Amino acid sequence: MKTLLCKFKYSLGHTLLISLMILALQVSSVQADPVYSLRGTVGVDEQSEMVPNRRSMAVDGGIEVNFEDQPPMIPHNIDKTRITLHENSCLGCHSKENQKITNAVRPPKSHYRTREGNKLRQISTGRYFCTQCHVPQAYTKPLVKNDFTN
Ligand code: HEC
Ligand code: HEC
């Protein structure tokens, strides 16, 4: 009787184990959609497709902002401007001194203050890399439909 019970327990455990293994196999064979980076299927050691050069948008009088405190978009081409440790050609036109001659829009007071609100004579280092916040626009077809209204 004892051996019979033992055998029964053994076979029950055995079947349970096998069914669990089958289940695990089934679960692992369910494949998720492959995940791609922005490079798509192009390998990291391969040349990615060239981004086509789009015509920059040039808008007289600037581009209307969509919400309060939005950094206004750059309404002109910036292909020839450079922002490096040693030069910032945006300031070549936009700095307080140069804008009097170039007639470029003068950066607001906020750009001449430290984070603590102290006034500065030069543009704040926190605002030095203009394109961190201000971006140009190009004439392209939108990738997705957008119904946003301001
Ligand atoms: C050759 C001179 C020149 C250079 C260089 C230049 N800009 Fe401008 N920018 C202008 C002028 C002029 C306007 C005004 C255009 C208008 O309103 O018709 C302007 C407008 C803007 C505006 C719009 C402001 C508003 O209130 O709508 C932004 C933002 C701006 N520029 C950012 C930049 C940034 C960032 C760079 C560097 C990447 C840069 N600009 C380089 C001349 C220049
Ligand atoms: C950290 C983000 C940030 C950086 C960096 C920055 N800006 Fe701005 N800028 C803004 C915001 C936000 C506004 C609008 C709100 C305001 O007036 O502060 C603005 C407004 C402006 C305007 C519009 C002024 C007007 O009266 O319409 C100009 C011009 C401008 N920035 C030029 C520049 C230039 C040139 C640089 C680089 C030297 C620069 N900004 C760097 C965020 C930034």
Image (spheres, rainbow, N blue to C red):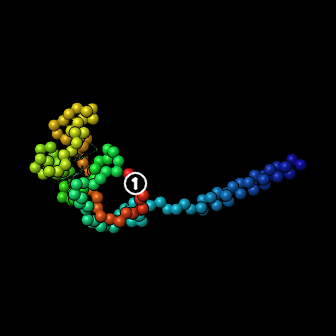
Query: Could you say which quadrant of the image residue 108 lies in?
Result: top left
Residue 19 lies left or right of residue 87; in this view the side is right
Q: Position of residue 50 (x, y in %)?
A: 31, 67
- Foreground pick, 20 / 14: 20
- Foreground pick, 30 / 133: 133
Q: How many marks?
A: 1
Residue under circle 1?
149
Above or below residue 121? Residue 31 is below
Q: Residue furthest right?
A: 1
Residue 25 lies left or right of residue 89; in this view the side is right
Residue 18 lies left or right of residue 77; in this view the side is right
- Foreground pick, 25 / 123: 123
Asked whether mark 1 and ligand 1 are closer than 8 Å, the reply comes as no
Residue 87 lies left or right of residue 56; in this view the side is left
Q: Residue furthest left?
A: 101
The residue positioned 19% from the left and 55% from the top of the image is: 81
The residue positioned 29% from the left and 53% from the top of the image is: 64
The residue positioned 18% from the left and 35% from the top of the image is: 120
Q: Position of residue 125 (x, y in %)?
A: 22, 41
Query: Could you say which quadrant of the image residue 11 lies in?
Result: bottom right
At label 1, counting other C-alpha atoms closer than 10 Å, the crowd grade (few under 14, some 14-19, many 20 or more) is: few
Could you tell me if residue 1 is visible in this image? yes
* Amino acid type assigned to the residue bearing label 1 in the image: Thr
Q: Position of residue 10 (x, y in %)?
A: 78, 52
Could you tell me if residue 91 is visible in this image? no
The residue positioned 28% from the left and 50% from the top of the image is: 72
- Disc 1 is placed on an element classified as loop
- Foreground pick, 33 / 24: 33
Q: Position of residue 14 (x, y in %)?
A: 74, 54
